[in-house]
Image (cartoon, coloured by chain):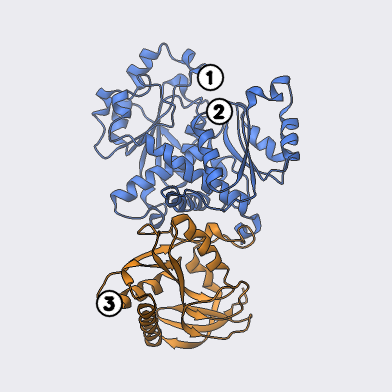
Chain colours: A blue, B orange
Amino acid sequence: MIASIRGRNLLSLDELSDTAILEVLDTAELFVEVNQRTIKKVPALKGRVVASLFFEESTRTRLSFETAAKRLSADVLSLAVASSSVKKGESLRDTIATIDALGIDAVVMRHSSSGAAHQVGGYVPHVRVINAGDGLHQHPTQGLLDVFTVRQVLAERAHAKGSETGKELFAGLHVLIVGDIRHSRVARSDIAAYSALGAEVRLAAPGTLRPASLQDWPVSVADDFDDALQWADVVGVLRLQRERGTGSFVPSLAEFTQTFGLTTERARRLRPSTIVMHPGPMNRGVEIDSAVADSPAAVIERQVSNGVPIRMAALYLSVTGSAEEASS
Amino acid sequence: MDAHASSPSRRRDDFVPRSLLLSADDVQRAVRRMAHEVVERVRETDCLVVLGLQTGGVAFAQALAASLWDITAQQVHQGTLDVSFYRDDVGQRPFIASAASQVPVDLDDRVVLLVDDVLFTGRTIRSALNALGDFGRPRAVQLAVMVDRGHRELPIRPDYVGKNLPTSLSEEIAATTEGVWIGSRGAS
C-alpha cells in the first residue's frame, strides 16, 4: 500500500492507503479556496511542464486536468491525438519518448488499454504519470473527486470542515453503485476509494454487466435494486457505455432503464438525505432520468467543479513531492 | 502515520524547549503594545485588514485584532493567509499542508497587516507578499511579528516586533500566545 502519492505516480486507487487518499482530499480542500478567488492561480508548479495525452475522447476530464495544471501555473503540452503521428502508427513508447525529449515533469494520460499508464511509468521513470483513465481498469481522480464530494456534502450537513472529519463520515456509510459495473473504470476506482475510507459498498447491475471476478472485490451485490435504494446513503449511477459495446449486454436500453435505471418513479423511494451521483457524461433517460439528474439530491455539477481542486492536489503532490519525504 | 502528520502543528514535534523566554502575560503585553503602535501609525483603522499567516500567525492575528478592538472600539477586518503554494522552495522541503486562506474583503486600497509568530529568513513573508497580489492591490502592507530572531536572507524588515531575540542558527524558537520558548530540534 502506498501511504502518500508525494513524488509518486497516481495509477490506481487500489494501491493507495486511506492516509494517501485523505492527504489528497485535504490538499484539494485548500485548492477549493484558490478556485473561489478572482485570481484563480497559484505559482506552485511554475516552470513545470505537464503533458496531457488523451488517446481516448474526453471533455470534462481533459478540460479539468488542463485547468488544474494551469491554475498551478504549470505549462501544458496538449497532444491532439487525432492529428498526431499516432495516426501514422507511431507506438506509445515512441510517442512518449518524443514528448519526454521536449522536457516534461508529468504526463496525464488516458488510453483505451488497461495498464497503459503503468506502462508509460516504466518508459519514463523520471516523469510523474497521472492516470486519467485506462481501459476498464481505473480512473483514480474520478474516484477521489467522488469521495471528496461526498465528504464535502456530509461535512456541510454536520457543519464541520471536511479536513477535520478525516474519514469518520465514511464509517458504515452505505454506498450503492448501479449500472454497467463490468465496463466501468469509475466503478473500480470508486469501490477502492469508498472501501479504503470505511464505507460499505453494494452493487446493483444485471448479471451480464457484473464483472467476472466479483468475489475478490470488497463489495456485496444487491438482490433487489429497489430495496437497495432505500438502504443507500449514496447512489452512484454509472454511464451505460455504449461505445464499449454495452448495448449488446442488455436486451434493450428500454429494458435496462426499466430494471436498473434511476427513474423519477424509483427516485421517490430514496431517503431525502440520499446523495445521487453520476460521473458524466449522462445518457439522460437511460441510466438516469432528467428530472432525477436535475433534482436537489443530485450533486453531479458539484462533482464536475470538484474535479479541478482534486486534480490540482494530485498534480501538486505527485509532481512537487519527493518519495523520501513521504516515507519519513 | 495519521492523516494530519504533515500539518504544521506537527512540524515542531521534535522541538525540545530549553527555557521559557516570555510568559503568556509577557506575550499579551507585547501584543497590546504592538496594537497601540499600529493605531498610532495607521490612524484610520477602518481600512485595516489583519491577516495571520497559516498557521503560526493566526492566533497572534486574533490577539492583535482583539487588542485593536479594545483600543479603538472598532472591529477590524480579520483573516488568514496560507502561503504553501507560493513558497520558492516547493519540492525542496517537506510539504506543509495547512488550512486554506480566508481573506474577508477585497484588499484593494486597504492597509494589510501581516502577522506571523517568528520572523527568520524572510522567505515566508516574501511568499505572503506574492500571495497578497492575488487578492487585490493593498494601499500598504505592514508586518507584525511576535519574535524577530534575525538571520534574514531577503531585504525584509518588520514594522512591529513583540520581542527581538538574537539566536544562533542551531537554536529554535517556538512562539505561541501561551509563551515563547527557545530550544533546539530533537535528535530524531
Q: x, y percentage for residue B58?
A: 41, 69
Residue at 50% x, 59% y is: B131
**Closer to us: A209 or A281:** A281
Depth check: A294 or A177 in front?
A: A294
Circle 1 sits in a helix, a strand or a loop, which is it?
helix
What SS does tag 3 mark? helix
Q: Which residue is mark 3?
A: B72
- Quarter of the image containing the C terminus of chain B? bottom right
Q: Which mark is residue A244?
A: 1
Picture layout, residue B142 above or below residue A323:
below
Are the residues flagged by discs 2 and 1 from a single subunit? Answer: yes
- Contact (CB < 8 A) between labels 2 and 1? yes
Residue B97 visible in the current orientation = no
Residue A11: percent from left, percent from top:
60, 40
Gap between marks 3 and 1, in whole Å?
A: 69 Å
Q: Residues within 10 Å of mark 2 (few under 14, many from 20)?
A: many
Q: Badge 1, how many Cα within 10 Å: few under 14, some, many 20+?
A: few
For this rendering, which residue is in front, A119 or B31? B31
Which chain does the numbered disc 3 sit on? Answer: B
What residue is pinned by disc 2?
Answer: A136
- Which label is found at residue A31? none
Q: CA distance from mark 2 to mark 1?
A: 10 Å
Which subunit holds the residue at mark 2? A
* Label 2 to label 3: alpha-carbon separation: 64 Å
Res A12 quadrant in image: top right
Q: Chain of mark 1?
A: A
